[in-house]
Amino acid sequence: MSGEGNWRERRGDVVRAQAEALARKQAAETERAKEIVAEFVAAMTAAGIAPGPLRARAADGAVRYRTGLRGWYVRRNQAMAVGEDGGFYLMDVPRSARSRLAGVRIAPSDPPLQVGVGARDGESMPLERLLRQRLEAGTDF
């Protein structure tokens, strides 16, 4: 029995070590993505592209809600935005009659290095490329 107990302990140690390594990797990727977003905000400001009001949207996109945020949409469907505060925002919220009157609060999300993972083919791309495309589009976005 002690052999089985040792195996379980070793297996638990391996699982914990793998989980810690994954957490470190994800934290490093998040920090790099935040740097990319900060560079984007600086570049948009330097290019004179003024931030505009950001509105959240119901999942179907038909209803819009005030957020009190200002920034730039980074997808043409306005599902993602970068705030002038450097926050990365996912703009989809549940439909709500109260929100039509009072608006909504959206908390910033950790930006991913690869946007749209798990989406349809062609919708996934590196964050850096997405933000570069948005910057290059200028005011014609």
Image: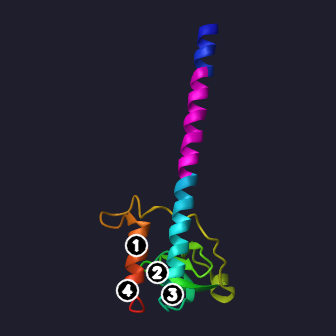
In the figure, residue 6 lies in which quadrant? top right
Model colouring: rainbow
Which label number is shown at residue 137? Answer: 4
Question: Looking at the rendering, which quadrant does residue 133 occupy?
Answer: bottom left
Marked residue nearer the N-terminal end (2 or 4): 2
Q: Describe the element under mark 4 as helix, strand or loop.
A: helix
User: In the figure, is residue 97 to the left or right of 28?
Assistant: right
Question: Is-magenta flag for residue 62?
Answer: no
Nearest to viewer (mark 2 / mark 1) = 1
Residue identifier under label 1: 130
Q: Amino acid at mark 4?
A: Ala
Judge whether 66 appears above or below 19 on screen.
below
Per the model, the C-alpha gap separating discs 2 and 4 is 14 Å
Question: Residue tagged by mark 3?
Answer: 46
Which of labels 2 and 3 is toward the front?
3
Label 2 crowd bin: few (<14), some (14–19), many (20+), radius 10 Å: some
Residue contact at pointers 3 and 1, CB within 8 angstroms: no
The CA distance from mark 2 to mark 1 is 13 Å
The residue segment tinted magenta is: 10-26
Task: Residue 57: give its label.
Answer: none
- Asked if labels 1 and 2 touch by Cβ distance under 8 angstroms, the answer is no
Give the mark toward the camera: 3 or 1.
Answer: 3
